[in-house]
Image: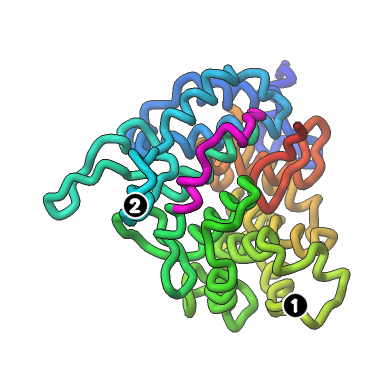
Amino acid sequence: MADDGDLLWSSPADQGLDDQLFDKDRHIRYLEMNYHLLPSPYEGQEIIRLTLAYFTISGLHILNAIDRVDREAVINWVLSLQAHPKNEAELNNGQFYGFHGSRSSQFRSLNNGVSVPNNSHLASTYCALAILKTVGYDFSLIDFSSILKSMKNLQQPDGSFMPIHTGAETDLRFVYCAAVISSLLDDWSGMDKDKAKNYILSCQSYDGGFGLIPGQESHGGATYCAVASLRLMGLIEDDLVSRCTSSSIIDVPLLLDWCLQRQADDGGFQGRPNKISDTCYAFWVGGVLRILGANNFIDERTLRKFLLTCQSEYGGFSKFPGQLPDPYHSYYGFTAFSMLQETGLNSFNVELGISTVTQ
């Protein structure tokens, strides 16, 4: 006779998906494993260790299990990754003094034969601050003036941001990172909001979604970065759909139509037209609908059913049904269930990308 675990993880053919459950305890064990020791395939991703820690620690907070981490050890480790200028004059040398993504990225690198001592990254800085916020660190103790002053070096004339001072792609992802950093630090002096706004608006496509750069195909992740950034900057209101305002700086009806078309027949969300459903877009697109105040238009029952087909027997979530779980899709699976108001989970701040923290 099958035990309860066998029944829970039997295939949809053997059991109705309506009977499947969100297995919180198993997900906590999965995250605890990642907290203590990541599987060997992640050795190649050491350079983004801070991002993997963000998925793990913030995930535990969503699951109401933040007590499983050593708060002081986490704080000390994250703070050890911050880049500091030697003096005030160095803030004008064009570098960015944020957080490194890992210990190895703190090593000096060579750029055209010249030693570069600082490889701090905008996305790593977002993850660092998100972790510190999640574990309740006092932000007044952070040297954030150097972060914000040097962040100006990353903003381009068109309003976009590059993630690292040595040069890289510029797109909406890093505009969003800059917006969250500014919001978490409650200081917008590190970015030209008007230029950033104009860049974001230039990325809205003819179909209502947003591309990562102007003229590019609309994409679920880019659309989230655009809408969340505008909301954080105070340039669009909450619940735009219910307000029925015609004065919004973005085309809300077209955006709403594009987002709603991303929920597929299987209940999951796709990132672009003609793509199959993927766990993470339940957050990227579902989050946009929540910011717009249009989450009531989501078919939550079928979305939940799709997500449960991606729930792993090992804990966590996979990208597609039947695959192994990974930290990225697991985290956005947890965020999706938080937005679906799963019992026992912390509420989620959609714009900031972390669960609601009260201090």
Q: Which residue appears at 47% of the width and 72% of the height?
A: 213
Identify the residue under disc 1.
248
Q: Which residue appears at 40% of the width and 59% of the height?
A: 153
Q: Quadrant of the C terminus?
A: top right
Pointers 1 and 2 in contact (CB under 8 A)?
no
Residue 304, image x, y percentages: 75, 46
- Name the one closer to the observer, 98 or 283: 98
Which numbered tag is attached to residue 95?
2
Q: Which residues are magenta?
A: 135-149
Is residue 274 in sight in this rendering? no
- Separation of residues labelled 1 and 2 (CA atoms): 36 Å
**Amino acid bearing label 1:** Ser
Of labels 1 and 2, the one closer to you: 2
Q: Mark 1, residues whose alpha carbon is within 10 Å: few (<14), some, or many (≥20)?
A: few
Label 1 sits on a secondary structure element that is: loop
**Relative to 62, 277 lies left or right:** left
- Residue 285 sits in quarter: bottom right
- Name the one closer to the observer, 41 or 320: 41
Which residue is outermost to the left? 113
Residue 188, image x, y percentages: 60, 57
> Magenta span: helix, strand or loop, mainly?
helix
Label 2 sits on a secondary structure element that is: loop
- Name the one closer to the observer, 66 or 138: 138
Q: Which residue appears at 23% of the width and 39% of the height?
A: 108
**Amino acid bearing label 2:** Gln
Is residue 75 placed above or below 260 in the rendered structure?
above
Q: How many marks?
A: 2
